[in-house]
Amino acid sequence: MNIFVGNLSYRMQESELQTAFAEFGTVQSAKIILDRESGRSRGFGFVEMPNATEGKAAIESLNGKDVAGRNIVVNEAKPRQPSGNRRRDA
């Protein structure tokens, strides 16, 4: 189950994100999305949990909870939609 996590602290590390979700079961991966130009966190990420029951328990328990000083938003990630040309002209 792929889980979207929003409103993350900009100082949060991927290991901290993984630890927060590991309380509910096996975490396959935890990824915080970084800005391409600055390399800083964009304030959201994704957690992959192979067991859907554990993933749903994590969503229900963590959505709206304070993690690292921020009330995080947690829900099941939607499949990525293809969008037009995202290429930027330099």
Image (tube, rainbow, N blue to C red):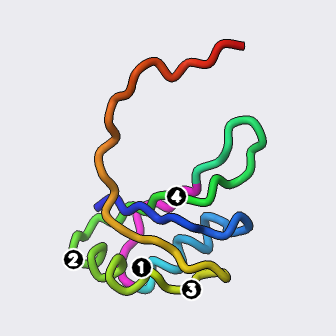
Disc 4 residue type (three-letter): Gly
Give the label, 1 or 2, closer to the camera.
Answer: 1
The residue wearing badge 4 is 45
Check the image and report above or below for 11 versus 66: above
C-alpha gap between disc 3 and disc 2: 22 Å
The residue wearing badge 3 is 66
C-alpha gap between disc 4 and disc 1: 14 Å
Numbered circle sitting on residue 63: 1
The reply to whether discs 3 and 2 touch (Cβ–Cβ < 8 Å) is: no
Which residue ends up furthest to the left in the rendered image?
53
Q: Secondary structure at mark 3?
A: strand
Left or right of 5, for residue 61: left
Which residue ends up furthest to the right in the rendered image?
38
Left or right of 42, for residue 61: left
Check the image and report above or below for 90 versus 83: above
Q: Which residues are magenta?
A: 24-32
Q: Quadrant of residue 63 in the image?
A: bottom left
Give the label, 3 or 2, closer to the camera.
Answer: 3
The residue wearing badge 2 is 53
